[in-house]
Amino acid sequence: MAVSTKPARKKVVALAGGVGGAKLATGLQAALPPGCLTVIVNTGDDFEHWGLHICPDLDTVLYNLAGLNNPENGWGRQDEVWTVLGEIERFGGENWFRIGDRDLALHLRRTEWLRMGLSLTEVTDRLRRLLAIPSAILPMCNEPVRTLVHTDEGDLSFQHYFVRRRCEPSLVDLSFVGAASATLSPEVHKALNSAEIVVFCPSNPYVSLDPILSVPGLRDFLRQCKAPKIAVSPIVNGQALKGPASKMMRELGEMSSPLTVVDHLGDLLDGFVIDRADADLSDAVILPALVTGTIMTDLSSKERLAQEILTFAATLRNIPVPSAAA
């Protein structure tokens, strides 16, 4: 089917969590005109630490889209300073979750604004504007939803499982506490309603995407959305590039495979993107599949993958290909 090659200003919504999600969001921002991207971010791993409201996935997306992230690990701030953490340790405080001085400033301001009565959406937009990010960044909801990890050692909050215990306990199940009381914010509703392409970033399907999808009404909204919906596999050659997705799949009795991801997301998708290392699986994918390089090592590779995804999405609906030149 022929696809128009005329550059187009298309509204693109990305669902993201973790470093992989932030990387692709960075590529999408580079590939699109300013103001065309909205990133809906997982907040299931938010928690309170040192009396502050911490939003790890939101912050990873903020720092990546602002070009301020630590390039070595993808999260946290570049050129970070650790004076406060050292003093916390001196006074016997908890140091298992490392917060640097620059990062601390953001947490202080967020907590202050939340205590003033602003919503998490309003606070996140303030931070985005102050960091001069041209894309919209939205928490999945304003209400607290917390990922609870059920393990062979008992129940753990996500950060205790992920950071403090380094994912060592075996996963039994997951639940999202508070999800039943959450609601789609007007901003998320508007973004999805106007979306012309929806991208599921290469994020952990269980603890990054599922919390977003647990917000009542979101799955139905996506099913009814006429925009092409494309997911990118976070699994390459049987392994997650970062994080515990592969371990979780095996402990839940699944294969660590792109096929597990596409089966998990099921009827929400119109297309699926897998790495060249998994090209032999493309015929087994139940959807139209794009086989390409999905490993993102620098801005060029992030933007290249993003543009390929946008072009692939356009082929599914015979719509103009989105471009930063529009």
Image (cartoon, rainbow, N blue to C red):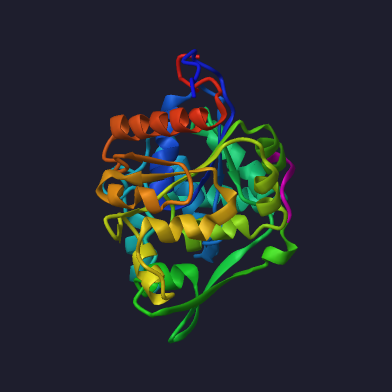
Q: Is residue 205 above or below residue 230?
A: below
Query: Is 174 one of the magenta-colored residues?
Result: no
Whether residue 153 is visible to the viewer of this picture, yes or no, is: yes
Towards the viewer: 274 or 64: 274
Residue displayed at 39% across by 80% down = 170
Q: Furthest-bottom residue in view?
A: 153
Q: Is residue 46 rendered to the left or right of residue 63?
A: right
Residue displayed at 36% across by 48% down = 282
Residue displayed at 51% across by 48% down = 58
Towards the viewer: 212 or 117: 212
Q: Residue 316 placed where, x, y %?
A: 52, 32
Classify residue 91 by image quadrant: bottom left
Q: Residue 224 placed where, x, y %?
A: 70, 44
Q: How many marks?
A: 0
Q: Is residue 324 above or below residue 158?
A: above
Q: Residue 82 placed where, x, y %?
A: 32, 54
Q: Which residues are magenta?
A: 183-187
Query: Is 184 one of the magenta-colored residues?
Result: yes
Whether residue 133 is visible to the viewer of this picture, yes or no, is: no
Q: Main secondary structure of the magenta part?
A: loop
Towards the viewer: 15 or 93: 15
